[in-house]
Image (cartoon, rainbow, N blue to C red):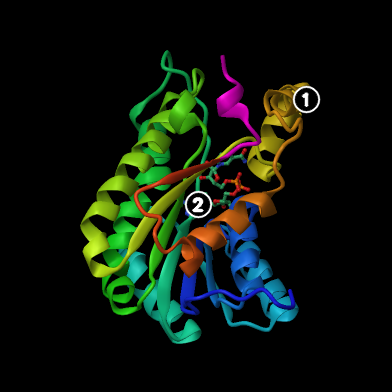
Amino acid sequence: MGSIESTPTTGVIVTGGASGIGRASAVALAEAGRPVAVWDLDGSGAEKTAAEIRERFGVAAVAQGIDVRERDTYSDAIDAAREALGSIGGLVHAAGVSHPVPVDSIEDDDWNLVLDVNLGAELWLVKALLPDLRENPGSAVVGIASINAILGNGVNPAYGASKSGLLGLTRSLADQLAGDGVRVNAICPGYTDTPMLSEAFVAAPALRDRMAAQSMIGRLADPSEIGRVARFLLSDDASFITAEHLVVDGGVVRSQR
Ligand SMILES: NC(=O)c1ccc[n+]([C@@H]2O[C@H](COP(=O)([O-])OP(=O)(O)OC[C@H]3O[C@@H](n4cnc5c(N)ncnc54)[C@H](O)[C@@H]3O)[C@@H](O)[C@H]2O)c1
């Protein structure tokens, strides 16, 4: 809290804001004074994040229960966010599903779920937000990809494809929107201590230590360590960074030999 400030001061929509990296991004942005709209399938979790933000930081925060696959709900949700926050000049797309199904048994529904939530939603959200992003100086978008975008994922091809696709989408949107003053970037987090991974640890408790050992730093990331990078990429401190992805993984990718 205290002296951290962020420019621009426009509002930010954070998908997946009820939990993990999305929640941490919303908190980090609000800590710097940016109003946030917390969107999530888990509407009560989103409200919990928004209430905590209002209480801790005294900035505007509004919650929205929403399935990011339901594009026809975007317009009303964006109107509500604009009204509550005053303006919208940023998007963090952190809503995501893992849903591991190997190539032997994957079906259309598995593929579509992962691609629609992790990848497609960012395209459709940016399309819906174009008037706001173009209107507000310093607007920026951050997509939460994964080190799987670089390394692949042998047991979850849809996830790996969705995350690699997000890097391609990032570069394409950045190229088109740079002339409008809108920057578009991605973060590739490494193993991060969120409910998404906790589920896997229940089935395979040794996995936590194995993942920690893959990082040079020897531990999982705390979600706040990703949220602060999202805040940076949305701020004017990152004013010359676009079409880029930042790998925030404690050295996992670089230590692969
Ligand atoms: N945890 C990790 O190790 C890790 C590593 C790299 C990338 N990521 C990515 O970070 C992002 C956030 O994941 P997390 O680890 O915080 O997981 P998480 O499960 O804690 O949070 C994901 C959130 O997305 C929401 N969500 C899922 N489907 C949705 C939909 N259709 N509409 C709206 N909201 C939906 C969930 O309700 C949940 O609140 C994901 O894209 C994930 O792939 C996570």
On whether ligand 1 comes within 8 Å of the CB at mark 2, the answer is yes
Q: Amino acid at mark 1?
A: Asp
Which region shows up in magenta? 248-257
| Residue under the point 61% across and 28% down | 252
Q: Is residue 239 magenta?
A: no
Q: Is residue 249 magenta?
A: yes
- From the viewer's perspective, tell me whether residue 206 is left or right of residue 188: right
Instruction: Give the image quarter of residue 163.
Output: top left
User: Is 96 drawn above or below residue 216 in the view shown?
Assistant: below
Query: 141 or 256, which lies in front?
Result: 256
Query: 80 or 30, which lies in front?
Result: 30
From the image, tell me which residue sits under label 1.
209
Q: Residues within 10 Å of mark 2 (few under 14, many from 20)?
A: many
From the image, tell me which residue sits under label 2.
95
Q: Which mark is residue 107?
A: none
Instruction: Check disc 2 and report its element: helix, strand or loop.
Output: loop
Query: 86 or 219, which lies in front?
Result: 219
Q: Quadrant of the N terminus?
A: bottom right
Image coords of residue 16 (percent x, y): 54, 56
Image coords of residue 119 (percent x, y): 37, 44
Instruction: Give the image quarter of residue 44.
Output: bottom right
Image coords of residue 206 (percent x, y): 78, 21
Image coords of residue 232 (percent x, y): 54, 61
Instruction: Check disc 1 and report its element: helix, strand or loop.
Output: helix
| Residue under the point 26% across and 74% down | 131
Label 2 or label 1, whichever comes before in sequence order: 2
